[in-house]
Image (cartoon, grey):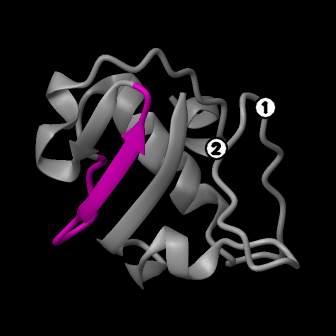
């Protein structure tokens, strides 16, 4: 299971450190759970976030993005954007990219 993602640069995310940004009302760090529902206004990063998960599914970086740099942390260890081809996460993503393909 993935617990969190830190982004140096990927799509709409830049210098995003999970533990500094994703907290509950009591200021406790909130990690991903077994089931997560991601919603938000248009252009808030939902598709970008799904593309990060899709890199794990496809074991390759998406085309048309430059200078991608992120770290995914979870129970199977940490995976950087340079190592997505070596990950052991079992991920399935249904997003607009999946539908187009």
Which dot, 2 or 1, sits closer to the camera? 1
Mark number for residue 96? 2
Q: Please tell me whether residue 66 is drawn above or below residue 79 in the rendered image.
A: below
Indicate the secondary structure of the residue bearing disc 2: helix
Who is closer to the viewer here, 77 or 14?
77
- Foreground residue, 37 or 30? 30
Q: Identify the image quadrant of the N terminus.
A: top right
Q: Can you name the residue that lies furthest to the left here?
A: 82
- Residue 81: x %, y % from top left: 21, 50
Question: What residue appears at the point 53 percent right and 81 percent down from the top-left corner?
Answer: 20
Residue drawn at x 41%, y 24% as measured from the top left: 57
Q: Residue 35 bears which disc, if any?
A: 1
Is 10 situated left or right of 90 in this image?
Answer: left
Reply yes or no: does residue 38 show up in magenta: no
When the figure is inspected, residue 90 is found, relative to residue 23, above or below; the finding is above
Measured in 3D between alpha carbons, the distance from the residue under mark 2 to the one under mark 1, in whole angstroms, is 20 Å
| Cβ atoms under marks 2 and 1 closer than 8 Å | no
Q: Position of residue 95 (x, y in %)?
A: 65, 39
The picture quadrant where one finds residue 61 is top left
Reply above or below: 27 against 82.
Answer: below
- Which residue shows up at 40% across the image and 20% down it? 89
Residue name at image x 67 percent, y 61 percent: 46
Side of 57 relative to 91 (left or right): left
Q: Which residues are magenta?
A: 62-75
Say if 84 sits above or below 76 in the image. Answer: below
Task: Tell me residue 85's x, y (percent).
Answer: 17, 28
Corner quadrant of residue 76? top left
Query: In the shown orientation, is residue 43 left or right of residue 38?
Result: left
Q: Position of residue 79 (x, y in %)?
A: 25, 41
| Label 1 residue SS | loop
Q: Earlier in the sequence, mark 2 or mark 1?
A: 1
């Amino acid at each position: 299971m993935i617990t969190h993602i830190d982004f140096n640069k990927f799509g709409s995310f830049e210098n995003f450190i999970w533990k500094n940004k994703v907290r509950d009302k009591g200021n406790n760090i909130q990690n991903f759970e077994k089931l997560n529902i991601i919603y938000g206004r248009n252009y808030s990063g939902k598709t970008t976030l799904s593309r990060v998960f899709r890199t794990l599914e496809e074991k390759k970086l998406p085309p048309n993005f430059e200078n991608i740099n992120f770290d995914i942390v979870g129970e199977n260890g940490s995976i950087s954007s340079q190592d997505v081809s070596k990950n052991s996460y079992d991920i399935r993503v249904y997003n607009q990219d999946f539908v187009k393909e």
